[in-house]
Image: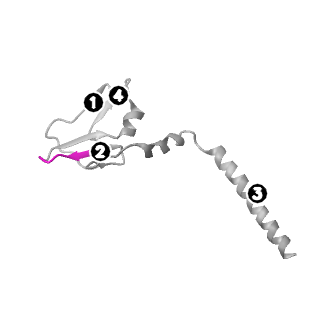
Amino acid sequence: MTAVFVLFTIVFCLTLDHFLARARARHASPAAAPALAAANYEIRPGRFLSAGHTWLSVNEDGDARVGVSELARRALGRPREVLLPEPGTKIRKGEPLFSFTRDGRK
């Protein structure tokens, strides 16, 4: 009797897991799949990355170089215009550093 109960419990749990997995697969976003490809992009040594897909590297002379990540560059394409702040402008953490336009969108 106990063996039948254990077997029934195992079959019930496997069946429930099967249907839950199918339900999750149906509701998965197709747009989420390309995000997995981000793991294939190279992160170069000496670059500091931000959550906004930008990077910063500092040269030996103290000058900084800023750019967008490879993932953002491939996703957004080639910009038509890059808008930079005036030289000497102080930028604080969290403020936009630059923007660019492409196909009339900023």
Reading the chain from its start, which is encountered first: label 3 or label 1?
3
Reading the chain from its start, which is encountered first: label 4 or label 3?
3
Q: Position of residue 43 (x, y in %)?
A: 34, 46
Reading the chain from its start, which is encountered first: label 3 or label 2?
3
Q: Which residues are magenta?
A: 56-61
For residue 8, side relative to residue 30 (left or right): right
Figure quadrant of the N terminus: bottom right
Q: At 36% from the left edge and 48% from the top edge, which residue is drawn?
A: 51
For residue 47, side relative to residue 19 (left or right): left
Q: Which residue is mark 3?
A: 15
Q: Which dot, 1 or 4, sits closer to the camera?
A: 4
Reading the chain from its start, which is encountered first: label 2 or label 4?
2
Q: At 33% from the left edge and 28% from the top edge, which residue is drawn?
A: 79
- Could you tell me which secondary element the residue under label 4 belongs to? loop
Q: Closer to the camera, 33 or 79?
A: 33
Q: Which dot, 2 or 1, sits closer to the camera?
A: 2
Crowd band around label 4 with a 10 angstrom C-alpha radius: few (<14), some (14–19), many (20+)? few
- Marks 4/3: CA–CA distance: 49 Å
For residue 6, side relative to residue 42 (left or right): right
Amino acid residing under circle 3 = Thr
Q: Is residue 37 above or below residue 4?
A: above
Say if the magenta span includes residue 60.
Answer: yes
- Could you tell me which secondary element the residue under label 2 belongs to? strand
Reading the chain from its start, which is encountered first: label 2 or label 1?
2
Q: Which residue is mark 4?
A: 78
Amino acid residing under circle 1 = Val
Q: Closer to the camera, 53 or 2?
A: 2
Q: Which residue is mark 2?
A: 55
Q: At 50% from the left edge and 40% from the top edge, which residue is drawn?
A: 34
